[in-house]
Image (cartoon, grey):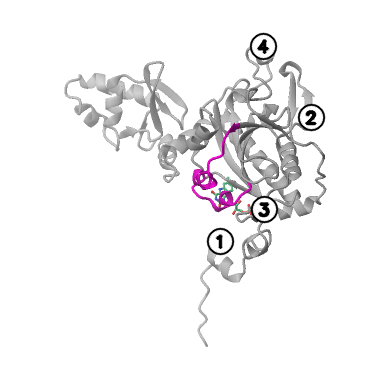
C-alpha cells in the first residue's frame, strides 16, 4: 500500500538536534537530513519503490530502510491503516486557525496530573524554587487606596442576570470608593491558607489553580475621582496603586485595543497579566498554559460581577496588541505576559447604557440564527 508523510507533524530544533514531532501520536524523533528530505517527497500517497527512486544517489534498500524507520516513528502513514484517517483529520482540522492552534491543543491534552509527591513538596519548600507571593515596585510612587468597606449587597440574582458587557459610558468619574472596592474585591486577598510544604498561600474571590495566584493587575486610569491619570500596578499586599508611567492619550490606549468602543469611553482599563513563574515552579507540563488562560477568565468574570454589583458597567476584550500593551507596562511578555484587557465606567444613560444594550431577539432574529436543527422539508399537500 502507498505511504505518505503524516499530516500532523511539526519540526524544530531541540538541543541542536532537528526533531520532528507528530502531535497526534505524540512521538518525537530526531531527524537526519536524509529523513527530512524523504519526508519532503512524501506529501501525497506514493509507492515506496517510487519514493526510493527519487533518490538515485542512494542505495534503494537504504532508502526503504529509512522509510520503514520513519513509519515506525509515526512520521509516515500507510494507506488503509487505522491511523491514516485520524491523521488526515488531526493534520487538517481547524484550517482557519492553522497548525499553531492544532499543535497547542493536541500537545496540551491528556497531560499527567501533577501528583503531590515528596519530590514536589521538597522542591516547593526550597527557598530558591518558591516565587514571591506578591509583586511590588518598591521604588514607585504609590497611592494607598481607601479601605472603607463598600457593601456589595446587591442581590446575587440582580448581579448574575444584570451583568452585561458595556460599550458606552457616561462622561463621569468613577468614585474612588467604588474603584477601590472593586480592586480589593477582585484582586485583593480574601484568605490565607496553610498549604504545608507550599507555605502560606493566598486565596482570592476567583479560583486559581493550586492557589498559585499568578494573575497580576495593572490599571490604566482615565477618570477616577482623586486618582491622577496614569499607568499603575495594583499592589495586592498593600492595596495600593504603584505609579509606573504617564498614561498615553486615551485615543492611544483605545488604539491598543484596536479602537474597541468599550475601551474608548471607559473610565479605566485593567490589564490582566500572568507571572508565569508562579505556575511553572509547580506545574511542569504544557497544559499549564491552558490553566493560565482559565485563571485569567475567572478574574475577568469576577471583575464583571463586582463592577455590576457596584453599579458600574464592565467590559472585557481579547482584542488588544499584546506587545504594545506589554511595552507600556514595561513587561518582557514572556516571564510576565498580558492576557486580557478589562475596563469599566459609569454606564451611559438611556438606550446606550445599562438598559437596552441590545434589542431582545424576536421571531425575525431567531429566523436568522436558526436555534434548532434544519427544518425537515414540509410535505406539499395536493388537493384531492
Ligand atoms: C474572551 C472574550 C473576548 C471578548 N472580546 C470582545 C471584543 O473584542 N470586542 C467586543 O466588543 N466585545 C468583546 N467581548 C464581549 C462579548 O462580545 C460579549 O461578552 C458578548 O457579546 C455577550 O454579551 P454579554 O457579555 O453582555 O453577555 C469579549 C468577551 C469575551 C468573553
The CA span between labels 3 and 2 is 34 Å
Q: Earlier in the sequence, mark 4 or mark 3?
A: 4
Q: Nearer the viewer, mark 4 or mark 3?
A: 3
- Mark 1: C-beta under 8 Å from nearest atom of ligand 1: no
Q: Residues within 10 Å of mark 2 (few under 14, many from 20)?
A: few
The CA span between labels 3 and 1 is 46 Å
Q: Which mark is residue 126?
A: 4
What x and y, as percent, mark residue 236?
70, 30
Callout 3: helix, strand or loop? loop
What x and y, as percent, mark residue 226?
70, 42
Q: Which mark is residue 327?
A: none
Q: Nearer the viewer, mark 3 or mark 2?
A: 3
Q: Earlier in the sequence, mark 3 or mark 2?
A: 3
Q: Is residue 48 above or below residue 312?
A: above
How many marks the image carries: the answer is: 4
Q: Nearer the viewer, mark 1 or mark 4?
A: 4
Q: Which mark is residue 191?
A: 2
The CA span between labels 1 and 2 is 48 Å
Task: Give the residue at mark 3.
Answer: 172
- Left or right: residue 162 compared with residue 277: right
Q: Is residue 269 above or below residue 31?
A: below
The CA span between labels 4 and 3 is 50 Å
- Left or right: residue 149 compared with residue 122: right
Task: Give the residue at mark 1.
Answer: 373
What x and y, as percent, mark residue 123?
65, 13
Quarter of the image where one finds residue 12: top left
Q: Earlier in the sequence, mark 1 or mark 4?
A: 4
Amino acid at each position: 500500500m502507498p505511504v505518505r508523510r503524516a499530516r500532523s507533524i511539526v519540526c524544530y530544533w531541540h538541543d541542536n538536534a532537528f526533531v520532528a514531532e507528530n502531535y497526534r501520536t505524540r512521538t518525537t524523533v530526531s531527524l537526519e537530513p536524509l529523513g527530512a528530505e524523504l519526508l519532503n517527497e512524501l506529501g501525497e500517497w506514493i509507492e515506496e519503490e517510487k519514493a526510493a527512486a527519487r533518490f538515485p544517489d542512494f542505495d534503494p534498500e537504504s532508502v526503504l530502510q529509512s522509510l520503514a524507520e520513519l513509519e515506525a516513528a509515526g512520521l509516515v502513514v500507510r494507506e488503509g491503516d487505522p491511523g491514516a484517517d485520524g491523521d488526515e483529520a488531526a493534520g487538517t482540522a481547524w484550517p482557519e486557525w492553522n497548525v499553531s492552534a492544532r499543535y497547542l491543543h493536541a500537545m496540551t491534552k491528556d497531560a499527567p496530573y501533577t501528583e503531590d509527591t515528596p519530590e514536589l513538596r521538597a522542591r516547593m519548600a526550597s527557598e530558591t524554587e518558591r516565587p514571591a507571593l506578591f509583586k511590588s515596585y518598591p521604588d514607585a510612587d504609590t497611592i494607598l487606596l481607601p479601605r472603607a468597606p463598600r457593601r456589595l449587597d446587591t442581590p446575587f440574582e440582580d448581579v448574575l442576570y444584570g451583568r452585561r458587557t458595556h460599550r458606552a459610558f457616561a462622561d463621569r468619574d468613577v468614585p474612588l470608593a467604588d474603584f477601590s472596592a472593586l480592586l480589593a474585591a477582585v484582586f485583593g486577598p480574601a484568605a490565607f491558607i496553610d498549604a504545608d510544604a507550599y507555605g502560606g498561600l493566598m486565596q482570592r474571590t476567583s479560583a486559581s489553580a493550586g492557589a498559585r495566584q499568578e494573575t497580576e493587575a495593572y490599571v490604566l486610569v482615565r477618570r477616577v475621582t482623586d486618582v491622577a491619570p496614569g499607568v499603575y500596578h495594583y499592589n495586592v499586599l498593600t492595596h495600593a496603586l504603584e505609579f509606573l508611567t504617564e498614561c498615553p492619550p486615551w485615543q492611544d490606549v483605545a488604539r491598543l485595543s484596536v479602537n474597541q468602543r468599550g475601551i474608548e469611553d471607559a473610565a479605566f482599563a485593567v490589564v490582566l497579566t500572568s507571572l508565569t513563574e508562579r505556575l511553572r515552579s509547580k506545574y511542569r507540563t504544557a497544559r499549564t498554559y491552558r490553566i493560565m488562560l482559565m485563571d485569567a477568565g475567572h478574574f475577568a468574570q469576577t471583575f464583571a460581577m463586582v463592577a455590576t454589583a457596584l453599579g458600574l458597567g464592565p467590559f472585557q476584550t481579547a482584542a488588544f496588541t499584546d506587545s504594545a500593551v506589554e511595552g507600556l507596562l514595561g513587561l518582557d511578555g514572556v516571564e510576565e505576559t498580558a492576557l486580557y484587557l478589562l475596563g469599566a465606567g459609569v454606564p451611559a444613560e438611556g438606550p446606550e447604557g445599562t438598559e437596552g444594550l441590545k434589542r431582545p431577539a424576536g421571531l425575525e432574529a431567531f429566523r436568522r440564527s436558526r436555534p434548532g436543527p434544519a427544518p425537515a422539508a414540509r410535505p406539499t399537500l395536493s388537493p384531492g
